[in-house]
Amino acid sequence: MKLRRNSEFPADLKLRPDSEFPADLKVRPDFPLLANNPGLHYLDSAATSQKPRVVLDALRDFYETANANPHRGAYALSVRATECYHQSRVRIAQFLGVADSDCLIFTRGTTEGLNLVAGSWGMANVSSGDEIVVTAMDHHANFVPWQVLAMRRGAKFRVCELTPDGRIDLDFLSGLLNKRTKIVAFSHVSNALGTINPVAEIARLVREKTDAILVCDGAQSAPHFPVSFDSLGVDFYAFSGHKMLGPMGIGGLIGKREMLEEMPPYQTGGDMIEFVHDDRTTWNVLPHKFEAGTPNAANAVGLAAAVEYLDGIGMDRVRAHERALMSEAQKRLAVIEGLHIYGPPASERSGVLSFTLGDVHPHDLATILDGEGVCIRAGHHCAQPLMRRLDVPATARASFYVYNDESDIEALVAGILKAREIFGYAPV
Amino acid sequence: MPQPRSAAEIGALYQEMILDHYRRPRNKGTLEKADASVEMKNPLCGDEIGLQVAFDGDCVCDLRFSGRGCSISQASASMMTQLVKGKSTEEIEAIRKQFRELMLGNASAADDPQLGQLRALSGVSRFPARVKCALLAWNALESALAERS
């Protein structure tokens, strides 16, 4: 592996200069769990975000004023439930830059969205001798479904290596691509390192050398900066609501209409059918074809409230706030002796800081930080292939979001110094 | 809302003896000739342990562990190997059961001299998320004993 810069900042991030927005968001009071626990420093938003009151209110409001089974009843209440569900889809599609909102399929989250593509498009289009490409930084949810698909179809499963500083090695990727490549799956942002991948450049490479579909794991991008699916250049994009201030158990898969229409259903059952004959069944139109069973309407409403809230702040500003926090955290942590930060420079990462401290195991670090009221993730971050390449069993990961501020960084630094002390390192 | 851990609880968890075993693990490595060999992983956190045991009749005459993990899992493995070496499977079984009691927060286990240095791990019981770390080596030992019988 040779060291190289993949690209400048991804073109799809139209950022204003840093100076325009410092880390000045003051929205912690909007989040009941945080507001009620002033000593809590929540730095695990890459795992799941906290929820603002407007989201909790939207859930309650749906159940108190609109609850019925959508698409079923002839009565006014069911019509209202249907309308709430539909409007939520339209609102979330607008947030993610999807003009054709019927191409946004609600799922339980990113994992289900990716499995949907693998199970439906993959099983219908991949055959023996074909090739599937993923990257070594992918989350297990964007790795294992493709590995299993490859095994089922007798296809080759190929893993794109990374540069030493934790980016997708585009030369390596280019070398993997050929006319047998059917699927290229990659994450927009690495959950373990925070690397923001150059989607446009990856898409250009893939289109140039293959007829493959491009599948993008958006779990860590949709919450943190402006994303416009229609100009992103990929065929499928999956995201999770709970990482972007919405409820757990709701997310989505966005796909290109012509592909979604060609694809066989993922699950079968109620709502997704048109006619059920004794000997065959025909399918409902998009998006219903991929939404078997009673939909998660309340959580869709909750997620719509979450994106409304994020738009109220402005996604450029969300990104700028996290970037300012990251830059401060990087500065404060980098000078701690024995602390090693993984991944590309802070300015090219999302709000994720993955690190180790001397011989202190990340789990011990997380326990000690918990003693200081600081919540971080420790472990392999569901990215074991990446951990093997970093040659560490685990890292500690602090991740930032709109409600974090400099006091969280203070507490993080204090906790790390405490861990050094407990493990017998000299004071810094 | 669960409250964060107190400094006293953290202090009780990370006793000097634990850090000593973490940094200078005893019986770490492999045996040239083992009667039972077990590998175990904690898929949640990625901790791994390999345990090799040599028997002399009904006694564990030697054992070694390998792998990597947090200070709790490594110290637990290191202290366990020291304590069970030379003991009969019956004695080991009694210690293993008593160690589980210690992890469940049973106060009488914390006073039981047969647990020896392992009592330094009593603070772990206050951290349910870390109990599995302390038990990993013991689960491996249980498998190794079962493999033999």
Image: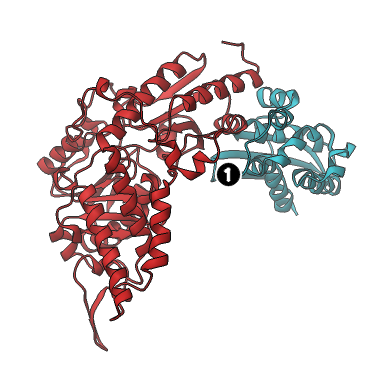
Chain colours: A red, B cyan
Residue lying at 51% horizontally and 13% vertically, measured from the top left: A337
Q: Nearer the viewer, residue A130 or A46?
A: A46
Quadrant position of residue A315: top left
Q: Nearer the viewer, residue B45 or A179?
A: B45
Seen as rendered, the residue at the extreme bottom is A278
User: Eyeballing the image, is A72 above or below A64?
Assistant: below
Residue B133 is left or right of residue A215, and the answer is right
Give percent across and percent down for residue A113: 31, 56
Q: Nearer the viewer, residue B121 or A67?
A: A67
Q: Does residue B60 show up?
A: yes
Residue A200 is left or right of residue B41, and the answer is left
SS class, disc 1: strand
What residue would you read off at disc 1?
B41
Looking at the picture, which amino acid does disc 1 mark? Answer: Lys
Quadrant position of residue A270: bottom left
Viewport quadrant of the C terminus of chain A: top right
Give percent across and percent down for residue A52: 41, 46
User: Eyeballing the image, is A176 above or below A295?
Assistant: above
Residue lying at 43% horizontally and 46% vertically, measured from the top left: A51
User: Eyeballing the image, is A354 above or below A334?
Assistant: below
Q: Residues within 10 Å of mark 1 (few under 14, many from 20)?
A: some
Give percent across and percent down for residue A2: 28, 22
The chain holding disc 1 is: B
